[in-house]
Every structure is written in structure tokens, then in C-alpha cells.
Amino acid sequence: MKRTILLFASLCPLFLFSQSNYDLAWKALDQNNWAEAFNLLLKAKQDPATFNDAYVTNIYAESYKGREKEITDINKSFYPVVENPYPYLYALWFNSSVVGENGKKRFGHQVELVKQLIKDQKAPGTLVSSANYQMGLHQLFSNEFGKALDYFNSVGSIRSWQYTGPFENLSQTGHYKNYGPLEHPEPDAGFKSNTGADIKWITPAQEIREGWIPVIYQFNNETAVVYAQNFVTSPADQPVYLATGFSGSIKIWVNDELLITEAKERRESCIGPTGLYR
């Protein structure tokens, strides 16, 4: 019995302190030993247990060195072989190794990855929507306007909005005021604008088709409050994602319930809580 205990005690430190190539790579990075870190990450990618993290860490390390454009195999070496690649793609979305910046894609692997996402039936709808938007921009900046519109139509944006405004937003105080449109969505409801003019809900004759609906196209005011409303009917109760982007501050109501409020003026995109909406 004593020998068995001693044998166990002698093996225990080896078990506790064994480190993978991935762990050693981070130690090398911490010591600013880049050459060794890249070598260890290469070895870590050969191990299925550390492949995901090693591959993504290598992208970040190469990006730090300004070499992310040299990584062109994510659509072949990572996306198809990882069981759940979507959180990684989301985190790296605008990295050149994934889809890169908005506009015309500079590299073939970016176009291929976007096309794969659009066809991927397992991909989250938010990523598929973003992929359609990216491909629409790519076609738009390639002067393929008909193709661009097809992709923009597949984004899934809510269209045909009604607007009213502008309302006073002196020193950004409008976010906390109630100007009446929330309680009066009816088309003949009347309000007073920031200049005291009589205003109602309007539906613009033309609307941008790119997926985003900037209110600046309807109201030439950079500091005012504007309301936009829409009516969406679902044939059944179902879980949905509410996704939006904004420049400024924002409030979003669904079925009279305030779901998102951001008073600080910024440029953001956000996804509201999943819920059952009718």
C-alpha cells in the first residue's frame, strides 16, 4: 500500500503540470517570443483538441503583425471542419481573413466565405443576413446593380416605414421626452414639430433598398428626434431576432414594450432579446 501511494504521488506532478503546445504558445507570446509562438501555434493546430483556439489565436497574432491578409484559407481549412464556427466568424467578421471591410471584396476567399454562409442552412439567421448584405455591397461596388439588389432583398430588412418628426432634442434631452407618436400610431394623428409646425405620419415615396434605413434621407436634421413605425404580422407566435443599427441614440418598442434604449449618442449595431412576437 505504501508503494502504491508513493507511486501516485510521484506521477501526480507530471499530470498537473503537463502543458499543450497551445498553452506554451501563449507563454511564448507573453515573453514576446513571436517566432516560437507561431511555431507552437502551428503544432497546436495539428491537435484536434486545440485546433479551434489555435487557428483563431494565430489569426489575431498575424493581425497584430499586420499580416492578416496572408490568411486566405479560413473558408477551406476552418469553416467546413469546425462543428460550430459561427461565434468565431462573428468575432472576426471585419478581419481581412474573414469578410474584410464593407465594399468590394479584395480577396477571393472573402467572396467564397460569404457565399458559403448564405447557403449554410445551419448558420444563424443574423449571420446569413449579414452575409447577404456584404455580398450586396460587393456587387454594388462592382457595378452589378441588379445582382446587388437581389442580395439586398435577401437581407430580410423591414421596409415601408412611416415617419414623423423632427422633434426637439436640445442638449440630447429628447431621448427622455414623450412627444406623443408612441400613443398615437394612427395615420391621421397630429403632432407639433420642433418649430411648432403641424405634422403627421408620412410614408416616403422612395426608400433606400440597401437594408439600412437612415432617417437623414427623410429629415435634414442631425440633432432632432424622429419616430419611425411599422406593422409586421406573423402567422404564428415564434422566436425572432430583433436586429438594428443606429447612429445617434435610440429607443425601440415592440408591441408597446420598450426592448432597447440607448441614450448615449453613438454608432452601433445591436440585437435585441429573442422573444415571441405576434
Image (spheres, helix red, strand yellow):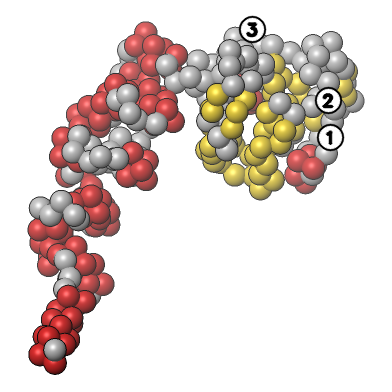
| SS at badge 2 | loop
Lower position in the chain sequence, tag 2 or tag 3:
2
The amino acid on which the numbered mark 1 sits, given as a three-letter code, is Asn
- In the drawing, what numbered circle is on residue 183? 2
The amino acid on which the numbered mark 2 sits, given as a three-letter code, is Glu
Badge 3 crowding class, 10 Å Cα cut-off, few under 14, some 14 to 19, many 20 or more, is: few
Image position, residue 71 (x, y; %): 18, 44
Lower position in the chain sequence, tag 2 or tag 1:
1
Query: Does residue 172 appear to the left or right of 43 in the view shown?
Result: right
Are the residues at dot 2 and dot 1 in contact (C-beta closer than 8 Å)?
A: yes
Give whichever of 123, 278 is nearer the camera. 278
Quadrant of the frame with the C terminus: top right
Image position, residue 136 (x, y; %): 37, 20
Image position, residue 141 (x, y; %): 35, 21
The amino acid on which the numbered mark 3 sits, given as a three-letter code, is Ala
Give whichever of 103, 77 is nearer the camera. 77
Task: Please tell me which residue is depicted at 79% across the width and 18% down the height of the picture.
Answer: 185
Give above or below for 14 relative to 269.
below
- In the drawing, what numbered circle is on residue 205? 3
Q: Which image quadrant for residue 12?
A: bottom left
Badge 1 crowding class, 10 Å Cα cut-off, few under 14, some 14 to 19, many 20 or more, is: few
| SS at badge 3 | loop
Query: Does residue 87 appear to the left or right of 75 in the view shown?
Result: right
The residue carrying mark 1 is: 178
